[in-house]
Image: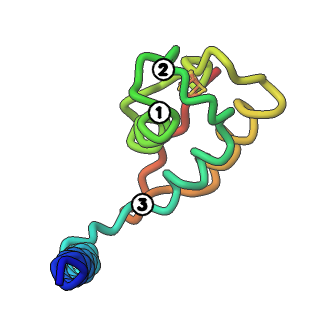
């Protein structure tokens, strides 16, 4: 008899898990915000230490700032190296303007 209560509890938990999973999938689908693909590209070129030494919350925030022009110096990333990180980012942003044709090319 007690096992039945356990079974009901498990079924309720499984149902709630399924319900919340469906809600999360639908929320992701309807509230999805399209992000500038250059941000992900620049983020891949950063060291991805996510140390915050640049003053931003992490490499993604720093990449966003570089792409939007909020950050003007790529060497704001203290962990990066010139040949490995800085130069490729500068070259990439010089070749990839935003959708309006504006270029925000950072300097060293
Ligand atoms: S300093 Fe560089 S590695 Fe550290 S969070 Fe900023 S961009 Fe990422």
Q: Is residue 66 above or below residue 42?
A: above
Q: Residue at x 62, y 14 (%)?
A: 78
Determine the CA span between mark 2 and mark 3: 22 Å
Circle on res. 62: 1
Q: Which mark is residue 36?
A: 3
Within 8 Å: ligand 1 and the Cβ of disc 2?
yes
For marks 3 and 1, give the CA distance: 14 Å
Q: Secondary structure at mark 3?
A: loop
- Mark whose residue sits in front, 1 or 2: 2
Q: Which residue is found at the position 46% from the left and 44% from the top?
A: 67
Decide if residue 53 is on the left or right side of residue 15.
right
Q: Quadrant of residue 40?
A: bottom right
Q: Residues under labels 1 and 2: Cα distance? A: 9 Å
- Which residue is farthest front? 1
* The image quadrant in which ligand 1 is located: top right
Q: Is mark 1 within 8 Å of ligand 1?
A: yes
* Dot placed on the residue nearer the N-terminal end, 1 or 2: 2
In which quarter of the view is residue 91 placed? top right
- Given residues 72 and 54, the one toward you in this image is 54
The residue identified by callout 2 is 52
Q: Position of residue 74 (x, y in %)?
A: 59, 26
**Which of the two labelled residues, at mark 2 and mark 3, occupies the earlier sequence position?**
3
Image height of 45 relative to 29, above or below: above
Q: Nearer the viewer, residue 59 or 63?
A: 59
| Above or below for 69 versus 10 | above
Sequence-wise first label, 3 or 1:
3
């Amino acid at each position: 008899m007690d096992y039945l209560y356990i079974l009901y509890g498990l079924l309720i938990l499984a149902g709630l898990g399924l319900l919340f999973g469906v809600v999360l999938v639908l929320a992701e689908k309807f509230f999805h915000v399209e992000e500038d693909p250059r941000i992900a590209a620049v983020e891949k070129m950063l060291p991805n230490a996510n140390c915050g030494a640049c003053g931003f919350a992490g490499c993604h925030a720093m990449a966003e700032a570089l792409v939007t022009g909020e950050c003007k110096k790529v060497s704001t990333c203290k962990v990066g190296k010139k040949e490995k990180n800085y130069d490729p980012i500068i070259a990439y942003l010089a070749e990839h303007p935003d959708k309006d044709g504006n270029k925000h090319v950072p300097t060293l």
